[in-house]
Image: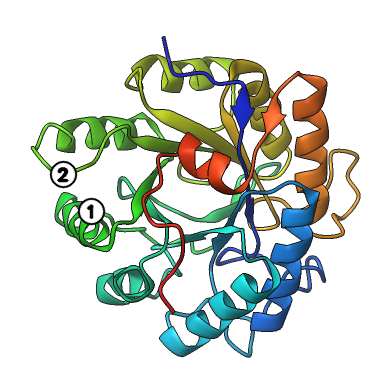
């Protein structure tokens, strides 16, 4: 039986690598905007913010100075929030650029992508691939192992991003290597990405049936699958990620006023289900996090 808990941790993915202000004005670009949005998310109930920093043009960036300023603003305005740094950053970032922020800032959490895939953006009504049609998001076994090693040295908890069953089995394979990962493992089930698998009750159940019994787990989903996955995780004792990286709207179709509004929705749903939304030290205990702060 997969691990279940009465406590619930809400993560907020504030921007991502793709979502832009011309889609939703609330997407943060500047370090100040990231700090303000992190504070709003924390006040709404989020324990964690997942960060892709942006440059002056609003493009995702591996620039360490911009990332540092972004983290400083977040910690200034929401000092108890837990930082989760992306190691995807953008489709143009090299492996060295992707892992360098983890090596530099030693965040409590960082994403660890688990397989290579045709990571794109598509119109699901027409079948047209509308962005990055020739892109392959490359995550070889060598890359995964190297990133995991650097995370071990930094004391950073890997959040294993599971886009399909192949990625999950990749992690179970590598976990057989002594010292590769600390236990319990932590998985993020990602539904609805073009190149991955959509949310269905069967796909959700399949993920849970294969995870180790002691692993912690969370879910996120693209567009309306964000809410489908979140409601299922809330009911089944898991954790939830929301935010404008994954979905710019609310369940009624209106543009979200910010990631914080989705956080408030998730907290409301959790409380209706009898779950206890936790932050700070309680959230760190739920995810077995070593590092309390980023190194700035």
- SS state under label 1: helix
Q: Quadrant of the N terminus?
A: top left
Q: How is the image coloured?
A: rainbow
Left-right relation of 215 to 286 = left
From the viewer's side, name the closer residue of 239 and 256. 239
| Dot 2 and dot 1 residues touching (CB under 8 Å) | yes
Q: Quadrant of the C terminus?
A: bottom left
- How many neighbours does mark 1 have within 10 angstroms: few (below 14), some (14-19), or many (20 or more)? some
Residue occupying the point 12% across, 42% down: 179
The single residue placed furthest to the left in the displayed view is: 178
- Sequence order check, earlier mark of 2 and 1: 1
Residue occupying the point 76% across, 37% down: 266
| x and y, in percent, of residue 287 in the image | 45, 39
- Residue 180: numbered disc: 2
Q: Is residue 240 above or below residue 100?
A: above
Label 2, label 1: how many angstroms apart (C-alpha)?
A: 7 Å
| x and y, in percent, of residue 46 in the image | 68, 49
- Residue 137: numbered disc: none
Left-right relation of 178 to 171 = left
Q: Is residue 29 above or below residue 278?
A: below
Residue bearing the label numbered 1: 148
- How many neighbours does mark 2 have within 10 angstroms: few (below 14), some (14-19), or many (20 or more)? some
- SS state under label 2: loop
């Amino acid at each position: 039986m997969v691990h279940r808990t009465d406590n619930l941790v809400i993560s907020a993915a504030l921007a991502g690598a793709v979502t832009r202000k011309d889609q939703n004005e609330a997407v943060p670009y500047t370090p100040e905007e990231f700090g303000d949005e992190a504070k709003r998310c924390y006040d709404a109930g989020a324990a964690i913010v997942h960060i892709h920093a942006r440059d002056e043009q609003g493009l995702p960036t591996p620039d360490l100075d911009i990332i540092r300023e972004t983290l400083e603003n977040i910690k200034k305005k929401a000092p108890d929030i837990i930082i989760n740094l992306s190691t995807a950053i953008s489709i143009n970032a090299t492996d060295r650029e992707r892992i360098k922020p983890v090596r530099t800032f030693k965040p409590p959490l960082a994403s660890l992508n688990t397989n290579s895939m045709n990571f794109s953006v598509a119109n699901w009504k027409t079948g047209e691939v509308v962005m990055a049609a020739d892109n392959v998001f490359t995550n070889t076994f060598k890359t995964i192992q190297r990133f995991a090693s650097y995370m071990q040295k930094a004391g950073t908890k890997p959040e294993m991003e599971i886009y399909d069953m192949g990625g999950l089995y990749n992690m179970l394979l590598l976990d057989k290597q002594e010292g590769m990962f600390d236990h319990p493992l932590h998985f993020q089930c990602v539904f609805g990405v073009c190149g991955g698998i959509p949310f269905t009750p069967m796909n959700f159940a399949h993920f849970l049936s294969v995870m180790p019994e002691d692993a912690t787990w969370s879910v996120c989903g693209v567009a309306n699958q964000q809410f489908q996955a979140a409601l299922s995780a809330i009911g089944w004792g898991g954790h939830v990620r929301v935010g404008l990286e994954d979905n710019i709207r609310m369940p009624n179709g209106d543009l979200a006023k910010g990631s914080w509004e989705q956080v408030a929705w998730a907290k409301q749903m959790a409380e209706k289900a009898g779950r206890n939304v936790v932050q700070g030290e309680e959230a760190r205990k739920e995810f077995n996090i070593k590092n309390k702060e980023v190194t700035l």
